[in-house]
Image: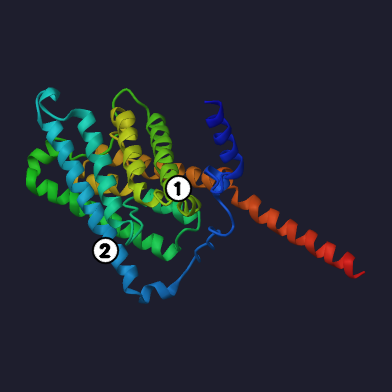
Amino acid sequence: MEGKEEDVKLGANKYSERQPIGTSAQTDKDYKEPPPAPLFEPGELLSWSFYRAGIAEFIATFLFLYITVLTVMGVAKSPTKCGTVGIQGIAWAFGGMIFALVYCTAGISGGHINPAVTFGLLLARKLSLTRAVFYMIMQCLGAICGAGVVKGFQGKNQFTTLGGGANVVAHGYTKGDGLGAEIVGTFVLVYTVFSATDAKRNARDSHVPILAPLPIGFAVFLVHLATIPITGTGINPARSLGAAIIYNKDHAWDDHWIFWVGPFIGAALAAMYHQIVIRAIPFKSRSLNFKGFLNCVCVCKLWS
């Protein structure tokens, strides 16, 4: 046994770890910070891929609203919650659809399916303002069409009676409670999106792009479990707008601003946190500038 232990120690010293693990695996050779997207990119308007991505966002948001609002209608229709999938089933419908749709559309449009996600990525300069506005319009149109198809299946009277899947602040909660729930819920979602799609992690861990839809869908599922009793869970302005337009009742519009302001604030906070704190991108650029300045000083001294 002693001889074997010696062999193991010798081998460990002779053949050291050549492939570092974790953050130390990242080197300048396999990753470079991508340049920020231009604010305006008129050339996109002449590209078919631009419109294809918008169509993908429309279809994905249409399917998302169709499945999720129909699930909500089924739960609301049942006289007893035990005979339906309940809140857990609704949460699974939202999370599962995001998982499936992000997986299907990530390679075409990035799989945003949510104006708040698009807004967060815009603030991080991951896409141009032109593309962001186009995505948001197509997402909202898709959501309206998806909720409209559900109303067609349910019938006008039943759809209205069951609440139309519209987001409202529940009784017993204030508008401030609803706003806070939407801010925190969207922060969780957008922070997960940034982490799951981080280009630096993709360069280091090849499995990350394949698994990215899973944590994003799971984040949506968990947020719905937590906030369905408070606001019905928006965290997606297109989803809230589509249901509100088709439902079209005053009490849905009274609280509607919460489902735009809250998600946009949450998305902005998540983008700032990831870019400034987690990735420290502003500090990296300053560090590079300072290093360049020091190099210039050293060169000048050598020549003098």
Left or right, 85 with respect to 8, comes to: left
Give the SS element for disc 1. helix
Q: Residue at x 74, y 57 (%)?
A: 291
Where residue 194 is drawn, which disc sits there?
1
Where residue 12 is drawn, which disc sits there?
none
Where is residue 91? Give x, y as percent: 25, 34
What residue type is disc 1 on?
Phe
Query: Where is mark 2, residue-wise?
Result: 55
How many other residues sit within 10 Å of disc 2, few (<14), some (14-19) or many (≥20)? some
In the rendered image, the residue lying farthest to the right is 304
Q: Which of marks 2 and 1 is nearer the N terminus?
A: 2
Q: In this picture, is 281 found above or below 87?
A: below
Q: Residue at x 23, y 30 (%)?
A: 88
Left or right, 84 with respect to 103, comes to: left
Residue 255 shows up from this direction: no
Q: What coloring was used for the rendering?
A: rainbow
Where is residue 265? Give x, y as percent: 46, 43
What is the number of callouts on the image? 2
Q: Which residue is drawn at 24% across and 36% down?
A: 92
Give the SS element for disc 2. helix
Q: In this picture, is 143 found above or below 85?
A: below
Where is residue 235? Give x, y as percent: 35, 41
Q: In this picture, is 147 found above or below 74?
A: below
What residue type is disc 2 on?
Ile
Q: Identify which residue, 111 or 6, lies in the foreground.
A: 6
Q: In which quarter of the image is residue 53?
A: bottom left
* Cα gap from disc 2 to disc 1, whole angstroms: 23 Å
Q: Identify which residue, 150 or 175, lies in the foreground.
A: 150
Quadrant in which the C terminus appears: bottom right
Where is residue 133? Give x, y as percent: 38, 61
Q: Identify which residue, 99 or 189, lies in the foreground.
A: 99
